[in-house]
Amino acid sequence: MTAVATEFPREVVTRSLVRYLDVPGSAGEFALITLDNGHDHTRPSTFGPAGLASLATALDQIEARSPAVSAVGITGKPFVFAAGADLGGVALLQTRPQALAIARAGHAVFARLRALSVPTFAFLNGVTLGGGLELALHCDYRTISRSAGAVAFPECFLGLVPGWGGTQLLPALIGPAAAVTVIVENALNQNKMLSASDAANLGIADELLDSADFLAESLRWAGRVIEGSVSVARAPLADEASYAAAVARGRMVADARVHGAAPAPYRALELIEQSRTLEFAAGTAAEDDALADLIMTDELRSGLYAFDLVNRRAKRPAGAPDKALARPVTTVGIVGAGLMASQLALLFVRRLRVPVMLTDLDSERLDRGVSWVHAEIAKLRERGRLGQDEANRLTALVTGTLERADFAAADFVIEAVFEQLAVKQQVFGELEKYLAPTAVLATNTSSLSVSAMARDLQYPERVVGFHFFNPVAVLPLLEIVRGERTDEATLATAFAVAGTLKKSSVLVSDAPAFVVNRLLTRFMGEITAAVDEGTPIEVADGAMAPLGLPMSPFALLGLVGPAIGLHVAETLHEAFGERFPVSSNLRRLVAAGRPSIYLPAERGDRTARLDPAAEELFELGDRASTSEQVRDRALAALADEIARMLDEHVVDDVRDIDLGLILGAGWPFHLGGISPYLDRAGVSERVTGRRFLPPGVASAPSV
Amino acid sequence: MTSTLSDRPDRPIRDVVFCDGVRTPFGRAGRAGTGMYAETRADDLIVAAIRELLRRHPELPPARVDEVAVAASTQIGDQGLTIGRTAAILAGLPKSVPGYAIDRMCAGGMTAVTTAAGSIAFGAYDVVIAGGVEHMGRHPMGEAADPNPRFLSDRLVDTSALSMGATAENLHDRFPHLTRERADLYALHSQEKVAKAYAEGKIQRDLVPVAIRSAELGWGLATKDEPPRPDTTLADLAALRTPFRPHGRITAGNAAGLNDGATACLLADAGTAAELGLPTAMRLVGYGFAGVDPEVMGVGPIPSTERALARTGLAIEDIGLFELNEAFAVQVLAFLDHYGLADDDPRVNQYGGAIALGHPLASSGVRLMTQLARQFAEHPEVRYGLTAMCVGLGQGGTVIWENPHYVSPAGSSREAGQ
């Protein structure tokens, strides 16, 4: 077999176990390979060099079997087929030749399977990702279990291409349009996975089988294929025009998502396009090069860093106290009945399934809030997201009261009232008369001081910041703010509640606007300042396009709402002074009540159009900057602000800033949030004199 | 006055038919997890059998199944939680289909059939799935049992009553002419008959292949029974030790082993079977259960057969085929001896029996029926057949079946009464 240039340290080796079975329909023995890394389903089987070597050894054995086997099948340990390459090992590759070697090692083994003269089968019993799916594509036939939930090529999501044959085999199997959907569109759509029936409908799997006796029935089906009583039709190769159209559509999708800033999807599209005419060996050689190139890019390393943040760090928030300290939450109180409060009520009742009481100043507002929640529950019921019993249960749990005394039973109260310190202090002071001393008082403030809110309370240690991002139901981030006197039990309860709400939380200290809003506002401040100085709006707002952010700064402002943006800017201006300028143009926009500087997007139209009414409000100075100048100052501001936040211990680790930007603002994996990008672009060192992360952590080794 | 049956004289007793039966290959329970099902769950075995039954009968809408009656002797762990209900859900039957668990130790599966059949005859059900499962590797016989001390203090049973091997030794004591040599010879024939039946493909057709997991070896596929030892010789058998008493007669060779496996069959009201197009492989004639002294539980099938014959108005001479569970050779010999049948009577266990195939306790009853059904099809000259087995703690069970393929020769034989 092909020698692998390097070993992956700490590789959890997936062994290829071979058994020779007597399968009805198969004249001779059926060699069945089981991929098993010896752990349960929480640690899916992956392929590193040793895993590939084990597969090669299995194939050696099978080829040497006498008499020769009649067929070969591959399946996985319970609930997992295979989850692709060992990414932990990929992140450690130091040189392009090493990267090329691992790319080739995968191809070499998989190609041997494809070259076998007997029929080959993959039985997809569970999770089938990346290299796992590619292994399956090298087989002649595939069955899939109805319960196999995660079938996908996540490579482009991370910054790779499906380069162990995926770009060459999938388009031929399911057509270029569907292949582009699976390889590029789904991957860039937050790594959307296929269900088993999707996979069968697309033609990735030939037969969809129940999970109850999946493997036995897969083998029975394989027996029928071998004896010829079942045949599988394959569509002829699509024509050049179909490939061109699919790839063109894929480029549009990639442009919309990453704006050209991440190389992987474009490289994948090239490979898909080439696959139509390239010999398989030439195609896989092109994949080798693409993989080797991409593995050595900063974008991939940042992607792997971001992936680790989202999949590991977000699940074990740094600084969270011992879970055992958390107090049970069996009744929730929500102060306020406006839209934010109502959204919180809906989220709390759906996830915690405990009584949720809303309160407000007058019954009209209160009734409107409660009715809104009830109506949302009814909508979920109508859409089939909730059963009738569950809808009844949740509806009964959400009530309103004008009597603060009714909050006596609440052990977790969150306020979402007007964003003014005195108002919030008054709300908490009044509630404290009724609450048990251990009841948590949480605030959803986006910029006020949590410690100040707690200052005059009898039990200030119970106050914690619980900062959601809008829309509450969609954005997964929660900033949990530790006030000066917040105690461990309160903090632990806040983290426990956040976990039950299925939010990823980051612990931050009580600094104005915390992490995400502070950075977004600082960054936005530079863009608006550039406009105020005279830079055309289009130039300033387009300046960040090369980074591939999910939306332009002014589009984000429209989403957040100019009034809220202005309020946060003013708060930060008050706290930090001129670093956070308040744009006079923004003030005029808010005063005029314009919802955005852009017109509402027309259906199917991706180009934003400036609203002439908003444009008219803007007064531009005479010092226009180029887009490059705007970008430079915005990035410098970000680096400066991150350094300050670290110095002030707003968070203890820059990783939590990146995690916040990824989950709270949707900043892309290829930037690793932002600090890896600032490091690799040299901005961090230029502005702050140091990098945020050591070389190699989220960047390619500089060899 | 409340209404009584006599107010409804037209209430019919319905005919019950055995449509089809399947089973998993049987495994050796083995020591320390060496059997082929060591890492396969018991409930997955019964689910495999039920699903195969449904697959073989697409003419049966699953929602028409009125009950799933599943037997297991040890109803804990993966055989607990009302195994009939869990198996129904896990097998993908509609949730409207109910299920229950039932137990009569070795005759659990047989009792699932008779109980469900009684309910069909009574008119409570039209179609039933009945079966049994025993994973003796995961659930050793008597696991977690807590016998009342009064069994011994009040001399209700002999100390040997709870050890099945010891009760079989007791049987040799009671019938001294049933020697170890006769038992070994009987066992050899059982192995030979199984080997022959396998060679003729008569066993395989009833089996559902089962995927078997091994963390060490990878996935495998069970397609045939693991217990048979076709190369057995009389000398091999004679050399085996007698674990239940020094100089005893019971050996691992002339007794069924400790096994894993599951069985399932489809029972229906005859009219419903005709309506749905379900096959009729056997017609239920009648059944009987009887108790005997627990320390000689192996004689149980004799009084239970007496009862079944008496209640059906048949005589032993009317029975053309026998499927007797071979828990121990001596216990089959006692039955044959009682009825004056030769040790190698060709009407008995044509495909061999549990000594070779294995005896996963509660599942075995349905295996006997499935094999009798196959033999009925091969023997249209036979009108009646009988399945019988002994049961721990001193019981026997017998079910008499009629062959729907029976072709009357010139001059008919006696009718079974109801």
Image: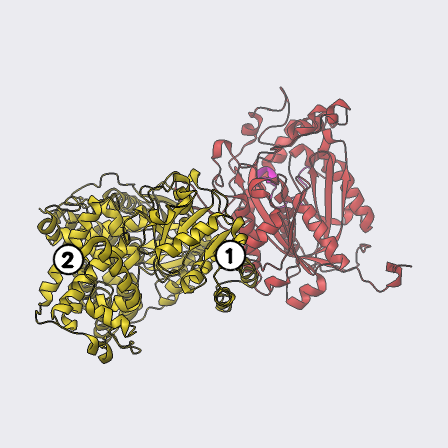
Q: In which quarter of the image is residue A472?
A: bottom left
Residue A635 tag number = 2
The chain letter corresponding to yellow is: A
Specify the quadrant that holds the N terminus of chain A.
top left
Residue situated in front as seen by the camera: B183 or A453: A453
Q: What stretch is highlighted in magenta?
A: B343-360
Q: Chain B is drawn in which colour?
A: red
Query: SS at mark 2?
Result: helix
For disc 1, the marked residue is: A357
Q: Which amino acid does label 1 sit on?
A: Met
Q: In this view, does A175 lie above or below A568?
A: below
The answer to whether A633 is drawn above or below residue A452 in the figure is below
- Residue nearer the viewer, A350 or A192: A350
- Quick one: A175 or B295, which is closer to the camera? A175
- The crowding category of the residue bearing disc 1, from other C-alpha atoms within 10 Å (few below 14, some 14 to 19, many at least 20), is many
Q: Which residue lies furthest to the right in this view?
A: B1
Q: Where is residue B84 in the image (x, y as percent from the top left)?
A: 62, 50
Checking the image for residue A487, the label placed there is none
Q: Where is residue A662 in the image (x, y as percent from the top left)?
A: 27, 55
- Residue B347: say if magenta: yes
The relative height of residue A542 versus residue B337 in the rendered view (above or below) is below
Q: In which quarter of the image is residue B296?
A: top right
